[in-house]
Structures are given as C-alpha cells and as structure tokens.
Image: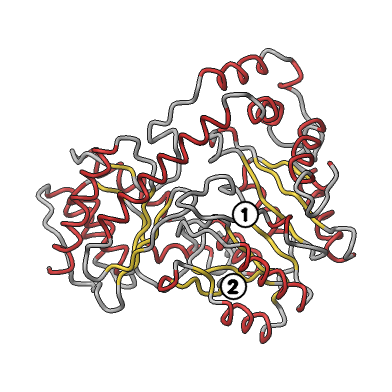
Amino acid sequence: MRNEIVAPGAGELTYEIRNIVTVAEKVQSLGVKINWENIGDPIVKGESIPLWMKEIVAAEAMNDESYAYCPTRGVLETRHFVCDITNRRNGAQITPDDVIFFNGLGDAIAKVYGNLRAESRVLMPAPTYTTHSLGEAIHANAIPVCYRLKPEDNWYPDMEDLECHVKYNPQISGLMMINPDNPTGMVYPPEILKKIVAIAKAYDLFIIVDEVYSNIVYNGERTVPISDLVGDVPAIAMKGISKELPWPGSRCGWIECYNSDKDPRFKKFINAILSSKMNEVCSTTLPQRCLPAILTHPGYREYLDERIARYERMSNITYDYLKQVPGLIVNRTNGAFYMAVGFEPGLLTNRQSLPIENREVRELVEGMVNVPGVAPDKRFVYYILAHTGICTVPLSSFNTEMLGFRVTLLEKDEQECRRIYTILTEKIAEYLAS
C-alpha cells in the first residue's frame, strides 16, 4: 500500500493466552494429547450447567423481547437489580444511570481505556491480565506503567512502589486493580484496598477495579467490593457473569460508576464511555434479562459454593505439588481460579529444552523458540507443551519482567489434576537440569 496503515508497535501487541491455543492445536493435530491449562473457561474444562439455569435461559428465549434491542445502558430491570445488590451494602450508592452493560468485560475494558486522553495513564499491577494492559497501552501508544505485585509477599502490591509511581508521574490519572487477581489468584485484603483508596484521594485520581471474580474467594481469605471503601473517590467497578455463573459465551458484563456526580472531569469521562457504547446501540439482551432470575434462584448459592469448594481443593493440590520444586516461587491461590508461578532469577536460559520425539512437532517448536527475542519462559512453556501436552501460559506475557507460567484450577477430576501436576513437577526439574 502507498501508506503505512498499522500504528507503531501494533505488531508487538500479543495475547499469548490465545496465541498458544493455535500452537497447541497444531501440536494436537500431530498426535499429542493436550491438557488445556491456559484459559479460564470453566465450560471447556467440563463444567456442568445445572438444569434449572438452562431452563431459565430457555424460558427467556421464548420471549420476543429477548430478541430486541435494549436501552444502551442495559435492561432497566436488570440495572435496578444490580443497583440493589450494591446499595444494600451501605457503601457507595448508585442508580440505574450509573450502570452500563457491555458485550463482556473485554468490550468494557476497550471502551473505558479507549475514551481516555492519550496523555492520561492508568497505573496497573505487574503482572496483570493481558486485556487490561493491552487496552491501556493501545490508548496511550506506549508501554504500560505498572506497580509491582510482590511474589515474596503473597503477590500483594508494593505500596511504596505504587505511590512513588503516582507521586513522580503526573500523567497518572487512575489506579487499576483486579480483585481477586488474574493471573496470580491473590485476594486484596480490605486494609490494602483502603490504602489504595487513600492514595487515590490524596492525588486526585480515579480507580478501576475488575471484580469479575469477586464472589470466588476461599482458603479463609476475605475481601470487599470497592464500593464499600471508595467514599467520595471516583471509581469504576467492572463486573460480569462469564466466570461466576459461569456463562462466558454470553458476552455479558457491566460497569458500575461511583461518584460521577462529584467530579466534572470524571462525569465527562463516563459520558464519553456511554456515547461510544451508543455507536453499538446496546449489548446482548438475552443474558441481561436472565441475570436476576439466575442469581435469585434457590439453587444458585449451593451451586456456586460447590464450585468454590472445588477450586479451593485444586488450589491446595496444585500448591502442594509445585512448592516442592526447587527454584519455583509459588503462592497459594485464594481467589478466582488461576495460579501464577515464578522462577527464581537466572534459572531459565535460552539453551534449555526437553526431548520431543515427533519430528514435525520438534521442528514446529524449535522454529518458534530459537529466534532472537523469545522470552525464556515462553521457550519453557512451548517445550513443556510439546513434551507433555500440558498447555500453560508464559508469565512474561502478563506484562511483567518476572519469568514463569500461569495455570488454571479448573480441572474437575482430582486424580487427573494430581496426574497433571505429577508430570509437570517432574518435567520442570528435568527442564531446569537440561
């Protein structure tokens, strides 16, 4: 073409959680059985949706209104419903006009960051979920600005590092958290959330909290929604049904906007988000109409509690296996269904490997990892995939300099989970010794 049409750096933006699926499918087609530990989709891992939930969706699908456009902000009755849940907590109070539904949180994330001035930055954790870091980087056309999560302290945020970034970078306008966290599985204690709110208030910032896993907490940990603590600080909470129900294929999420009436700049920002959503008319109607009936069904709490108990079991099994491997930095997962595992500095190199018997698979992997610039943990993940069939994600793809990998806790069969991590722990040791 006569003009360059791709933005600078666009080719460097990668979503390794999905990229590795393409490679794994090629490896699978060449005869290697794959254990999918890379993506947080409970349905793919065999989650059974209860009959009563399917009946609610089926009944709603018989209503003509479920096939129509809904208001841009979302179905009014459902917005009233989510407001009632928040307002009962006696924290920040919202009205249906403070709620905007999206086609999943990926859509919400794109709209929120996309409506920021390019010069305004949102400080986010490292590591962090790729959709957030890519969304912020794309809007600013710059690498993300991050505060460190400390693997030596349960992945809690380094508060000194966080405040230093805010103090010495006047472009920072917002602070972002994922609570419970993806990829680490860390749960923010209320005391830490209070400190972050205090920093936001002191420096006149707004807050974004991705709370899609807020009701999946275990191992005795406790957290609270940001609405409980935010006071008069402007904030956005991101919520959805893809993980908790779980219904990821619904593409249904929403934001709750707190204190937009207390700051004219923040109010203008929220209005810009709503205006950009108007260009799409609205988000999917059917799941919004189903949401109140599902969450108030007598069987819902029991169903969610059973899933949470299973994630807790799997978190402890996974932790007990991986903590035995010398050189790994492992923290117990206490929320969501992910675990981030780091390697001690200097352990991974660009020379390590595992034997790959299938020649085509070996050539495929070697062609991908033996090129300049490939992160050592990506090399590790691809050799593990080809050698064992266990598909994980390199930790460096989550916007962090720390090398490691992320797994999920979604395996339903306890014996299969033990088999996978018996193999993985053995092969990690073998890889490091190669």
Q: Which residue is mark 1?
A: 210
Quarter where residue 72 is shown: top right
Q: Is residue 66 left or right of residue 307?
A: right
View extreme (bottom): residue: 168
View extreme (front): residue: 220
The residue depicted at 81 percent of the width and 55 percent of the height is 270
Between circles 1 and 2, the one closer to the viewer is 1
Disc 1 to disc 2, C-alpha distance = 22 Å
Q: Is residue 332 left or right of residue 243?
A: left
Q: Earlier in the sequence, mark 1 or mark 2?
A: 2
Looking at the picture, how far across and down is residue 320, in whole percent?
A: 28, 55
- Residue 243 tag number: none
Q: Which residue is nearer to you in this view: 407 or 17?
A: 407
The residue depicted at 89 percent of the width and 63 percent of the height is 262
Q: Which residue is mark 2?
A: 142
Label 1 sits on what residue type?
Asp
Looking at the picture, how far across and down is residue 300, in whole percent?
A: 58, 29
Q: Which type of secondary structure does the marked residue at label 1 adopt?
A: strand
Q: Which type of secondary structure does the marked residue at label 2 adopt?
A: loop
